[in-house]
Image: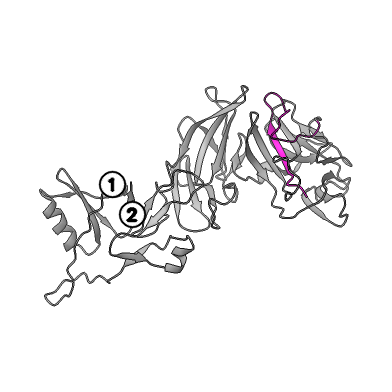
Amino acid sequence: MKLVFLFLVILFSSLENPGFVFGGTGNDTLFPGQSLSFGGRTLVSNNGFYQFGFFNIYGGHTFQNEICLVLLLGDNNFTRVWQANIDITLSDPVLNLTRNGDFVLLDHYAKTYKHIIGSSGNKTVSTNLVLLDSGNLVLRDSKNSSRIFWQSFDHPKNTWLPGARLGSNLSLISDGHYYDYAYSFSLEIDPSITRGFVIRLDSTDIMYHGVFPDWMDIREDSNHFVTFYDTKEYSHLYVNLHAWKISIHQWFNESYSKVLWDAPFDICDGFSICGPYGLCQSPNDVHLYPLCSCPSGFQPTSPQSWKSGVHDKGCSRIISWDCEITENSHYVDAFYLMENIIKFPDDSRSLAVRTEAQCEASCLRNCSCAAYSYNNSKCSPYGLENYLKPG
């Protein structure tokens, strides 16, 4: 068994790369009755930037089969553009364009296995599979090129290429699990804000709201689908969602790429990943989960979920809080000093006070105030919905 990737790659210089196993070259079109197999022919776009075919990126022999399209950045770097949702191990995978107009995955040895990736839906129509200069892989009518039955642009994964659309049910999906637990992230277009987007943790309400940069050429149609294009200043662009971070890259013929813009700064910046009252400490590695902890006097709201790495329920007071303090109260509310806070909530308010004692007293009188910060006569109270990020 091999971990076999079906790749769409950008070609820069030489494909003689010890880190990748490439098949032979070919033109940009697969005709009815023709096939692609591991170690065999590949499709190459007319502009020479993209290649599509089977690859074993690890070079070994005992791996699970996957079908992917990636964008190759130089000799040793690639980014995944598209991946088919096929979870199966095949001994000898073959991609075939049938004479009935179907683009299918077969197992050369297990004749009974057949997975249809794209179809014309009409057995009387002759189709071609074409790799366009845009990086879009299309199944289209061989006699009418404008009649497209299936295209990779309609099935986005973790990468957004110029000319492709996002919106409605078309969103980016992060390239694999973010860490050891079953979390993933997706990027959706926010139609309520110009250039707006949302990065969502799984299907939860934990999300980051952002805006693409002004220099990006983004166009919206009447159905709220969004497309971006290269500009005179910035060409050869692609947008990539890696774990929780969205980034805009520019690639060059010199076999390298650079990041022009990314967001958010880290996972604790915008994501309430540690929940109410939870303290979020950012990891040094984008692939690692942030460190969540509870402040003094608090404990995990859901200890079982907390132990399993799910912290979105946050922390709760060990002793329940009775806001109405009376003479018979057994406990007196006090504040716990927290140092090295490097990010405060964005929606904090300011109170006009002269001293820190007045700031503390003001917070104690307000049952919705859970914490405060004070600096140079600036008093900022924080409510239950706010979270702090320690350094």
Q: Is residue 365 left or right of residue 305?
A: left
Is 364 above or below relative to 45? Answer: below
Q: How many marks?
A: 2
Which amino acid, mark 1?
Answer: Asn
Among numbered discs 2 and 1, the one appearing first in the sequence: 1
The magenta stretch is 1-24
Is 48 above or below relative to 372? Answer: above
Residue at 59 percent across and 44 percent down: it is: 158
Q: Is residue 20 left or right of residue 317?
A: right
Examine the rendering and report whether any part of residue 132 can be seen.
no
Residue at 46 percent across and 64 percent down: it is: 307
Q: Residues within 10 Å of mark 2 (few under 14, many from 20)?
A: many
Which corner quadrant of the image does residue 57 belong to?
top right
Q: Position of residue 222 (x, y in %)?
A: 56, 43
Q: Position of residue 341 (x, y in %)?
A: 29, 47
* Magenta stretch: includes residue 3: yes
Closer-to-camera residue (346/370)? 370
Q: Position of residue 102 (x, y in %)?
A: 82, 48
Examine the rendering and report whether any part of residue 340 can be seen.
yes
Which amino acid, mark 2?
Answer: Tyr
SS at mark 2 in the image:
loop
Between marks 2 and 1, how big is the CA–CA gap?
14 Å
* Magenta stretch: includes residue 291: no
Q: Residues within 10 Å of mark 1 (few under 14, many from 20)?
A: few
Task: Please give the label number shown on residue 340.
Answer: 1
Closer-to-camera residue (192/362)? 362
List the residue tagged with mark 2. 387
Residue at 59 percent across and 46 percent down: it is: 175
Q: Main secondary structure of the magenta part?
A: loop
Q: Quick check: marks 2 and 1 in contact, CB under 8 Å?
A: no
Q: Position of residue 376 (x, y in %)?
A: 15, 43
Q: Nearer the viewer, mark 2 or mark 1?
A: 1
